[in-house]
Image: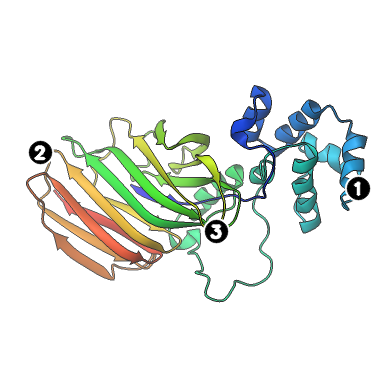
Amino acid sequence: MTLDSVTPVVGRADTRSIAEIDDPELLAALRTGPFSEALRVAIRRSGLALERVQSRLLTRGVRVSLATLSYWQRGRSRPERIESLKAVELLEEVLRLPPNSLLNLLGPRRPRGRWQAGSPRPLTFDRLWTDHWALERVLEEASDRLNEHVTGLTIKDQYWIGADRTERRVVTSQVLRAERDGIDRVVAIFRGDDPDQQIPSVITVQYGELGRVWSDDESGFLVFEILFDRMLDRGETTVVEYEIVFPEGGAVALSSDRRARYPVREYLLQVHFDPAAVPRRVFEFSRHNAQTPDHMRNELLIGRSGMVHSLHSDCVPGVHGISWEW
């Protein structure tokens, strides 16, 4: 089974945060979207006519037609251009919404400009999964920007293998740092090894809460948001932890790994084997991507506790995992 950690979203200072919204309908719309629904509810709750919203945007130096505003709240079009995204930012101010509460619900901006010198270029999904198109199909529905403004400082994955040699659960802990103001969530990607196994439906989040969830039964990809318990400014850190419980009846497990798009300061992978199902041999491995052979492979010894681990300091993008032979 594989994991990949991802996504943030960004903002400015404002008078209200998500936690300060006491309107259940508005809160639900901002939490789960889609953008059109959140905008429609926010305008209605503000008591402002569409013409008044347009006028207040104009006083702030942005001209948006009534037709465009109407299309946005009906879902017929979405803000994409830089000028439109600026208008959305000002809409949050006009409607007294938390910073980035609308922007976070929009899809990824088209790439513009060049990478800054020294910025790590993430691995593309086709380098991490051979059937990357299935993941991209799910991400189109999720429509979030991935790994743009958050840094994974430490990541710890713990897998439990049952007496039947199948994966029972995984617990992931992450220490994350915001690289811009207004970061309030990440998106995690999960994919089981057995395409015939039911996608996990039990996801428990600590130090935050579960946001939107998307899945693709055909490929087995599961994508979900983790909402931080508070919004982060640049340089601030947070800890998130989540547990995924696997349905019964899965295939015999042979490995566990993480697909890393970005560098991570430290990555720790632990696998706990049931005393009734201890493998003959265990190996740690690393690959530059999913299409290349192992460039690092070492045998690991299993202790009396039935646990093995693999530690990666200054972990580079690629595939890092533990495999075993029964």
The x and y percentages for residue 297 are 22, 66
The CA distance from mark 2 to mark 1 is 69 Å
For marks 2 and 1, the one nearer the N-term is 1
Amino acid of disc 2 = Pro
Relative to residue 22, is residue 258 drawn left or right?
left
Residue linked to disc 2 = 275
Question: Residue 17 or 111: which is nearer the viewer?
Answer: 17
Residue linked to disc 1 = 59
User: Viewer-nearest of labels 3 and 2?
Assistant: 3
Label 1 neighbourhood size at 10 Å, few (<14), some (14-19), many (20+)? few
Residue linked to disc 3 = 179
Question: Residue 207 or 73: which is nearer the viewer?
Answer: 207
Amino acid of disc 1 = Thr
Q: Which residue lies furthest to the bottom in this view?
A: 117
Q: Residue furthest front?
A: 15
| Badge 2 element | loop
